[in-house]
Amino acid sequence: MAAYKEISKEKVYMGSADYDSDLWLELSKVCEENNIACGEVTAIGALRSARFGYYGQDERKYSFIEKSGHFEIVSLNGNISLKDGKPFVHAHIIFSDENGNCLGGHLAEGCKVFACEFTIHAYDSKDFDRAYDEQTGLTLWKR
Ligand code: ZN
């Protein structure tokens, strides 16, 4: 059965990432600066280059894909929780090229920002803490 908790929304942060910054690092910095232990992140914008991950379920390992070129961030969705006691951003991204073709996956360090507008919803919980999960090999929320 699914494990879940009721939590309340506390604050909302809206902003933009710096030109040429690393998208994942920028979002992580905002969460660390504001001590966001639990929350949700969304963003749209454009990238100067992309890097994202794919988790091989059999190999239990991430492989990372790098794409050079200019892209639209069609959608970025993710959550914020604690990993090793610190705010951790786990997000997935879909982006499109000049023909409208989309690619996407696990947001990794290495996406260069052209422009990006983000919204972070912070919640009032410290209960979402990550730990190694034997079944998947991933670092998931403790249940
Ligand atoms: Zn992921």
Image: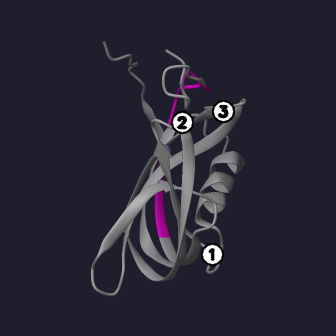
Specify the amino acid type for callout 3.
Answer: Lys
Classed neighbour count for the residue bearing mark 1: other residues with Cα under 10 Å, few (<14), some (14–19), many (≥20): some
Determine whether, in the image, residue 37 is placed left or right of residue 71. right
Give the residue at mark 3: 83
x then y, percent, for residue 75: 36, 62
Specify the amino acid type for callout 1.
Answer: Asp
Classed neighbour count for the residue bearing mark 2: other residues with Cα under 10 Å, few (<14), some (14–19), many (≥20): few
Q: Main secondary structure of the magenta part?
A: strand
Query: Which residue shows up at 63% across the image and 32% down it?
Result: 82
Number of marks in the rendered image: 3
Q: Are marks 1 and 2 in contact (CB under 8 Å)?
A: no
Q: Please report whichever mark, 1 or 3, sits nearer to the chain's N-terminal start.
A: 1
Determine whether, in the image, residue 105 is placed left or right of residue 132. left
Using the image, tell me which numbered label, if any, was put on residue 127: none
Looking at the picture, tell me which residue is in the foreground, 32 or 25.
Answer: 25
Determine whether, in the image, residue 24 is placed left or right of residue 93. right
Using the image, tell me which numbered label, if any, was put on residue 60: 2
Using the image, tell me which numbered label, if any, was put on residue 18: 1
Specify the amino acid type for callout 2.
Answer: Arg
Magenta part of the chain: 117-131
Q: Please report whichever mark, 1 or 2, sits nearer to the chain's N-terminal start.
A: 1
Quadrant in the rendering for residue 49: bottom right
